[in-house]
Image: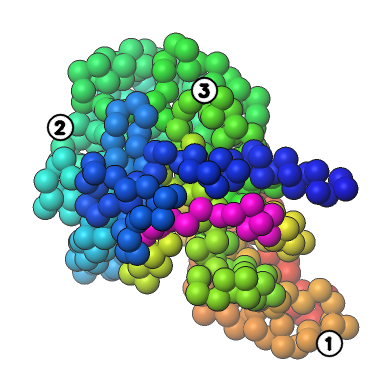
Amino acid sequence: MKKDINRRDFFKTAGSAVLAVGGLGAIAGCKGGSSSATSVTDGTAEDGDMTYRTNTVSGDKVSILGYGCMRWPMIKNEEGKDIIDQESVDRLIDYAIEHGVNYFDTAPVYLQGQSEAATGLSLKRYPRESYFIATKLSNFSNASKENSIQMYRNSLKNLQTDYIDYYLLHSLSGGEAFSRRFGDTGIMDFLQEERKAGRIRNLGFSFHGDRKGFDEMMALHEKYHWDFVQIQLNYVDWRHATGRNADAEYLQGELDKRGIQSIIMEPLLGGRLSKVPQHIADRLKERNPQGSVASWAFRFAGTHQGVLCVLSGMTYMEHLQDNIKTYSPLVPLTEDELGFLDETAELMQKYPTIPCNDCKYCMPCPYGIDIPAILLHYNKCVNAGEIAKSIEDENYRKARRAYLVSYDRAIPKLRQAARCIGCNQCSGHCPQSIDIPKQLHRIDRYIEDLKQDRL
């Protein structure tokens, strides 16, 4: 009986009962962002039509699938430096726009400062009114008003535009961080004036923090009138958020109370919800053989009626195509499917993966360590059942070899965990509050134990 009551509360919070009777009045399915919207809940949307939602502040018709520009494909230039593959970016953006995607999210710090310029160069080939640009004030290292204004103006220049549709105060954790970077510097007066002038069409913030911090940011709504808020939401974080992050159920609920729409980041938890343990993948595929493992997470994020747009960092064309398929049109989850994912999230808690979302905020490491690659390789092996717990395990030899061989293939020797000296310059930048040196040292000890057969 207790389990049934909890699940009933879960359905109520998720809004699935409202969805079932057409409560998503702001959803529309149409190609190219046309304002002549067709509801996907009345059964009239045609297969292949992107789903759109209406911004209740500005009236924008926004594709529910947004392009996260933090993971553009990279290549080496003649000097061996990693640079964005502009031709691939153009192909991806062309395909996305052709299939109805019109929201593109970037930031000055993405891809070591290269993302905004590459995104702007590609989007410039299209009429400005045909897409929405989101970027951020990433003034982590220098929050002075002068530097912040210069960063804002550089974004306009890099994006080759004279206005920004969605401008975010980047990665806030609460009132103290807000005051230090924005409230006490005078930059908010400037940003509000830019919003009045129309050079910022919508002003909001992205959030990584606990309930107390979110409550502090919500208390500022009356003064600053947030047009939207970007939060981390997926079917695991809905009730099982890790680190300092608050459960998404709470965050979305607080936004709903105030009528503030959300932009969703990390619907796949940095890819972890598309690379789940095999028995969980089998469970998802058995329930929906036609859909991908990732499609469950995207449908979950899109089902909530307060969500305006769901971001995905799509490096490869097959990822873009799969996500477009999921949202063309979106089929909201039923109450039964929401319960199924709630149970799936419970199962996910049994697998001790590291909550790395591959955002690369920890990079570059001053000692050349490829931090995200090490953590993601470990997670991959956990999900594949290739972590040996004891030399007595039946599959110890197989797991030992699999981990050591794949580790050397995935990460060059000079970029492996053994080089970490514990300087801890990385942890402060991690939105998931991972103690990165601790995890690197733990992984390195595990590797040495495998090499010495002393588990």
Write the residue at 88% across / 83% down: 392
Residue 408 pos. (x, y %): 55, 78
State left or right for residue 6 relative to residue 419. Answer: right
Q: Which amino acid does label 1 sit on?
A: Glu
Residue 437 pos. (x, y %): 64, 52
Q: Which mark is residue 258?
A: 3
The span shown in magenta is 327-341
Write the residue at 51% across / 53% down: 332
Closest to the observer, 40 or 275: 40
State left or right for residue 285 relative to residue 129. Answer: right
What SS does tag 1 mark? loop
| Vertical position of residue 315 compared to residue 244: above or below | below
For label 2, the residue is: 162
Neighbour tally class for label 1: few under 14, some 14-19, many 20 plus, Cα within 10 Å = few
Residue 416 pos. (x, y %): 56, 67
Q: In which quarter of the image is the C terminus?
A: bottom right
Q: Nearer the viewer, mark 3 or mark 1?
A: 3
